[in-house]
């Protein structure tokens, strides 16, 4: 009697494990389509890519793009807000279906997540305040000054790999910030002398603060921006890429760029 | 965005801030009290384990525990950001509250316990009817301090994406470039929450105070 | 026929290297008031705490009536219900009123109803003269009043024997009298009492027997007349002489 009971329990456990494994290998796309909902992470503190409008609603280039993508997937969009640093881990950990937050491709990130096709291309920029007396003609010139950057961004990676590690820029002179607007504040009050960031949001900051100016612009660490997707999920990536190509062909993305990036 | 909308956007986070606090603080109290009783009355082995618990959870920055619980632990059990955050803060608070209750229990002189036993009360009853009622009164002032800390620490759940007061201030501040206003607003709201709480606890302390002649 | 309530045989208590007392024999008969005197630190308090099992002796036996309470497996909580103790520092429960203090044992240990407990508690408080202070908290009572509540609290349990551990040593001189008076009346009412005290007047007038302890031994015991007027040992005479001098002066001043 006891033996049979144990056998039943063992079989049930095995069955449960098989079911669990089976569910594991299903694409997130299936889950999204079943639930008729996609949960997308973003950090809405990065105008004009993602920020809050006057009513406190999310708006911006990335936001509108994602809303259109969700529409074409035929599902409802659920925004999940998180600090930028946490977004990749959240997608990797299955807490989010995907994330759009002005992500550049990055080898480190690629280890735990996947990237969609690029939906736009950006540039880097170096910004200084009016009090700046130095010169930056080449990007490496920034090593002579106190530099600030948003933590976890590709600019952060570029500065670390190209200036700090070779010993050109002392570690102590590189300040990392949780958000780019914090870095801009410190730039304005002189705690840092140079800010390296993505051209578009930095442009927006400069437009708001006439004391700041862009002294260098070019593609160093940035370039294409992508949507962050769960690792190894071929079906989801295929679907998202398909929609991105569609939108590019229709001129939808260009129109968004005009709307949000005009200087 | 006018001033009213601005403040209102941030203030809406208050509901979540209160929610996190109302989970973290009472769960911390329950666990902390049980552990404190074990610590003081449970014998040498128990007190060693409790000491370890206290050292660990008071030695880790709360936000680290939040991340561990949210990203690592919940690979198995699916915890929302709100619950991962609230429970983490509850565990951290329980370590501090254990020390508070332990201190209060020890402050009630051991003689009180002895007198209770002399009347014939069992150890359990002596603790429950003689030591604990006195310890509660001693615990309120430091507990009021802990309550204020938890209210403020609740802001840490921003790191998991819970749209409470601080996170909302960050977003609206960055989006509108009005940082000072955003953070000042957040500060004022936290201040009011803490003020209200400490006033309430002060009132409770007075109500429970044992009368004596000065 | 003397009926022993408390029998102590060959009792020894050590604390690490120190011998507190050893090979003590003592018998307290029903209705007796036994007063233990002697220099401080000679184990008198420890002896009382062994009697109600707050401390365990290292060797020897104690009987309460016919029950050997030092035996293994004794229900200590049960035994303590039948032994009342009054402490030098009163040790009232600070969070309860005088009435609450006296009632606690009745409701939680004897499982009396709240009404019955209140009636009994008030009776004991009346007995010690504090019925009108029933709703006062210890912090609102004088030392002498607190100690009397302590006595009422112990009496409420209807103990077989009352233990008094230097009950007036922590009191201001003016307040000693009211407590000693309660104790004297208790003795007259026939309560079996074991009292550790420095109050020689009380010892001389109320005790049935006086026990002189020093350095962990019982040096001598006898009736008050024997001990004060013809003690057998010079040490006894010396101690009583010194103490009487000291306290005799105090009594004269109090008058």
Image (cartoon, coloured by chain):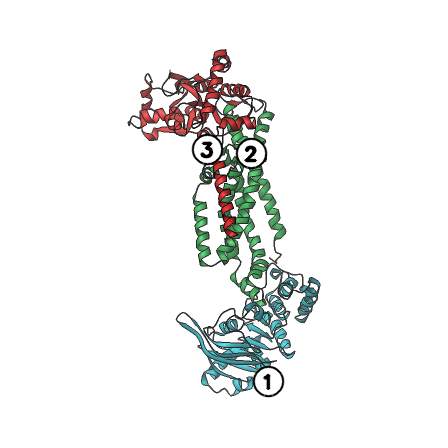
- Residue designated by label 2: B188
Q: Is residue C149 above or below residue A125?
A: below
Which chain is cyan in the picture? Answer: C
Q: Position of residue B143 (x, y in %)?
A: 54, 47
Q: In the image shown, does B146 or A90 lie closer to the viewer? A: A90
Colour in which chain B is drawn: green
Colour in which chain A is drawn: red
> Quadrant where the N terminus of chain C lies?
bottom right
Q: Considering the numbered disc 3 on the image, is that residue within a helix, a strand or a loop? A: loop
Q: Position of residue A184 (x, y in %)?
A: 43, 24
> Quadrant where the C terminus of chain C lies?
bottom right
Q: Is residue C98 above or below residue B30?
A: below
User: Which chain letter goes with mark 1?
Assistant: C
- Residue designated by label 3: A93
3D distance between C-alphas at marks 3 and 2: 36 Å
User: Which chain letter goes with mark 2?
Assistant: B
How many numbered marks are there? Answer: 3
Q: Considering the numbered disc 2 on the image, is that residue within a helix, a strand or a loop? A: helix
């Amino acid at each position: 009697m006891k033996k049979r009971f144990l056998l039943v329990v063992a079989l049930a456990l095995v069955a449960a494990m098989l079911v669990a494994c089976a569910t594991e290998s299903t694409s997130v796309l299936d889950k999204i389509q079943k639930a008729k909902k996609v949960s997308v992470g973003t950090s809405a503190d990065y105008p004009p890519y993602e920020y809050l409008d006057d009513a406190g609603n999310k708006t911006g280039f990335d936001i509108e793009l994602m809303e259109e993508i969700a529409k074409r997937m035929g599902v409802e969009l659920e925004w999940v807000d998180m600090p930028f640093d946490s977004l990749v881990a959240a997608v990797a950990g299955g807490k989010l279906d995907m994330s759009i937050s002005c992500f550049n491709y990055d080898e480190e990130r690629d280890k735990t997540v996947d990237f969609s096709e690029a939906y736009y291309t950006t540039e880097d920029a170096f910004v200084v305040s009016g009090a700046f007396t130095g010169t930056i003609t080449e990007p490496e010139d920034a090593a002579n000054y106190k530099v600030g950057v948003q933590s976890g961004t590709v600019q952060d990676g570029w500065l670390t790999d190209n200036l700090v590690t070779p010993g050109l820029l002392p570690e102590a002179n590189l300040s990392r910030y949780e958000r780019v607007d914090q870095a801009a504040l410190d730039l304005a009050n002189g705690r840092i002398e140079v800010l390296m960031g993505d051209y578009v949001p930095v442009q927006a900051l400069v437009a708001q603060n006439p004391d700041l100016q862009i002294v260098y612009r070019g593609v160093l660490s940035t370039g294409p921006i992508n949507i962050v997707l769960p690792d190894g999920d071929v079906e989801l990536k295929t679907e998202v890429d398909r929609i991105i190509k569609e939108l590019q062909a229709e001129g939808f993305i260009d129109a968004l760029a005009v709307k949000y990036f005009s200087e | 965005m006018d001033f009213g909308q601005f403040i209102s956007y941030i203030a809406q986070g208050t509901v979540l801030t209160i929610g996190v606090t109302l989970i973290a603080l009472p769960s911390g109290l329950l666990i902390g009290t049980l552990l404190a009783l074990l610590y003081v009355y449970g014998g040498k082995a128990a007190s060693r384990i409790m000491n370890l618990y206290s050292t660990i959870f008071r030695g880790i920055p709360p936000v680290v525990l939040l991340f561990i619980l949210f990203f690592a632990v919940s690979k198995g059990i699916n915890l929302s950001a709100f619950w991962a955050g609230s429970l983490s803060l509850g565990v951290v608070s329980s370590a501090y509250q254990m020390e508070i209750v332990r201190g209060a229990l020890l402050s009630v002189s051991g003689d009180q316990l002895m007198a209770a036993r002399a009347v014939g009360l069992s150890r359990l009853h002596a603790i429950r009817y003689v030591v604990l009622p006195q310890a509660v009164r001693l615990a309120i002032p430091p507990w009021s301090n802990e309550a204020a800390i938890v209210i403020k620490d609740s802001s840490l759940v921003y790191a998991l994406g819970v749209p409470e007061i601080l996170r909302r201030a960050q977003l609206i501040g960055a989006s509108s470039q009005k940082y000072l206003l955003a953070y000042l607003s957040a500060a004022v709201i936290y201040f009011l929450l803490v003020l209200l709480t400490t006033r309430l606890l002060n009132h409770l302390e007075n109500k429970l105070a044992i009368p004596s002649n000065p | 026929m003397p009926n022993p309530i408390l029998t102590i045989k060959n009792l020894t208590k050590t604390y690490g290297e120190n011998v507190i007392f050893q090979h003590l024999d003592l018998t307290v008969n029903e209705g007796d008031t036994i007063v233990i005197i002697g220099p401080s630190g000679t184990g008198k308090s420890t002896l009382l705490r062994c009697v109600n099992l707050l401390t365990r002796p290292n060797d020897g036996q104690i009987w309460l009536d016919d029950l050997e309470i030092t035996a293994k497996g004794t229900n200590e909580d049960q035994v303590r219900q039948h032994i009342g103790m009054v402490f030098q520092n009163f040790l009232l429960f600070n969070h309860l009123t005088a009435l609450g203090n006296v009632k606690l044992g009745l409701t939680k240990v004897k499982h009396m109803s709240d009404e019955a407990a209140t009636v009994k508690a008030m009776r004991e408080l009346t007995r010690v003269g504090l019925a009108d202070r029933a709703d006062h908290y210890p912090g609102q009572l004088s030392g002498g009043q607190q100690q009397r509540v302590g006595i009422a609290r112990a009496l409420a349990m209807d103990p077989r024997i009352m233990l008094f551990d230097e009950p007036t040593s922590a009191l201001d001189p003016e307040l000693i009298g009211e407590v000693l008076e309660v104790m004297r009346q208790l003795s007259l009412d026939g309560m079996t009492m074991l009292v550790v005290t420095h109050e020689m007047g009380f010892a001389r007038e109320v005790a049935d027997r006086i026990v002189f302890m020093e350095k962990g031994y019982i040096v001598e015991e006898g009736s008050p007349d024997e001990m004060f007027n013809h003690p057998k040992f010079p040490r006894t005479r010396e101690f009583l002489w010194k103490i009487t001098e000291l306290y005799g002066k105090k009594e004269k001043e109090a008058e």
